[in-house]
Amino acid sequence: MLGIVGGLSPESTILYYRYVVEEFLERFGGRRYPELMIYSVDYARFSGAVRSGDMSKALDILVRAVKALMRGGAEVVIISANTPHILFDEVVAATGARMIHIADSLAKALKRDGVRRVGLLGTKVTLTKGFYVERLARHGIEAIVPPPEGIEVVDRVIRDELTRGIIGEESRVAVEAVARELVRAGAEAIALACTELPLLIKGEIAGVRAYDTAREHVRDALNTLLSGG
């Protein structure tokens, strides 16, 4: 059984559920649907803790969610957002859960396609705290982040709009402008390193492929679960 830590935000949780069902049907067809559990945490409490630097509180929220999923029978657990992976190692250590890091899933897809330099779009925390860039570097992938003003643009769109289900053309244009700068800086592809960004961007951006980290995360989790690995 797959366990999903959701609520981070509710919009991305819905996307994860849809992706799990789609990927499962692609593998098995018919009317087979996967057994899974979602533990939806309080987005405001978690995001507030992270932004205020109270990482102990943020960790406690994630640990409680993962432990609840494990008690319910989850064999593999994933967190349906990129930013909370700043605490990934601590959550694994505190729970002993079999978990999959979203940046590892992205790295598998990038290496499969021969991409060695990727531009990152995501929240301010994801792009400035180093954990995501460093995780990709372990796989031999160089990550390029926007300049501070670009980070602020994308972070605002995610926080004020996408997490609330607001999708605007002006915001899409603004995010694409940031992506274009990353391509000019040498990015061979763009990673949507925020699981709400696929609500705004589909397929490609700034003339290059846009990797949906939520989709890659789900694929990786199902491969692990179904193979028993």
Image (tube, grey):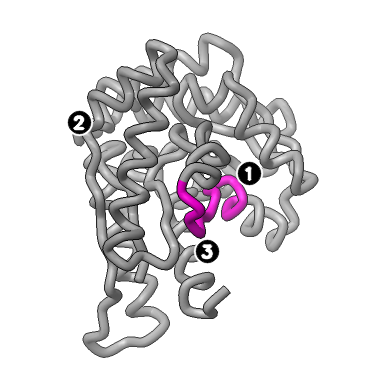
Q: Which residue is mark 3?
A: 220
- List x then y, in percent, for residue 23: 38, 71
Of residues 40 and 23, the one nearer the viewer is 40
Label 2–label 1 contact, CB within 8 A: no
Give the number of the mark in front: 3 or 2. 3
**Residues in magenta, as a range:** 95-106
Q: Examine the rendering and report whether any part of residue 154 can be seen.
A: no
Which of the image's four quarters has the C terminus?
bottom right
In terms of depth relative to the viewer, which is nearer, 188 or 97? 97
| Circle 2 residue | 164
Crowding at dot 3, Cα within 10 Å, few <14 / some 14-19 / many 20+, comes out as some
Image position, residue 109 (x, y; %): 62, 58
Q: Is residue 183 left or right of residue 56?
A: right
Residue type of the residue flagged with mark 2: Arg
First in residue order: circle 3 vs circle 2: 2
Can you name the residue that lies furthest to the bottom here?
30
Q: Which residue is mark 1?
A: 189
Residue 60 percent location from the top left of the image: 36, 32
Q: Are marks 3 and 1 in contact (CB under 8 Å)?
A: no
2 falls in the magenta region: no
From the top left corner, tell me how far across and down residue 155 is, in percent. Answer: 41, 21
Residue 37 picture quarter:
bottom left
Q: Is residue 100 above or below residue 151?
A: below
Res 103 label: none
- Disc 1 residue type (three-letter): Ala
The mark lying in front, picked from 2 and 1, is 2
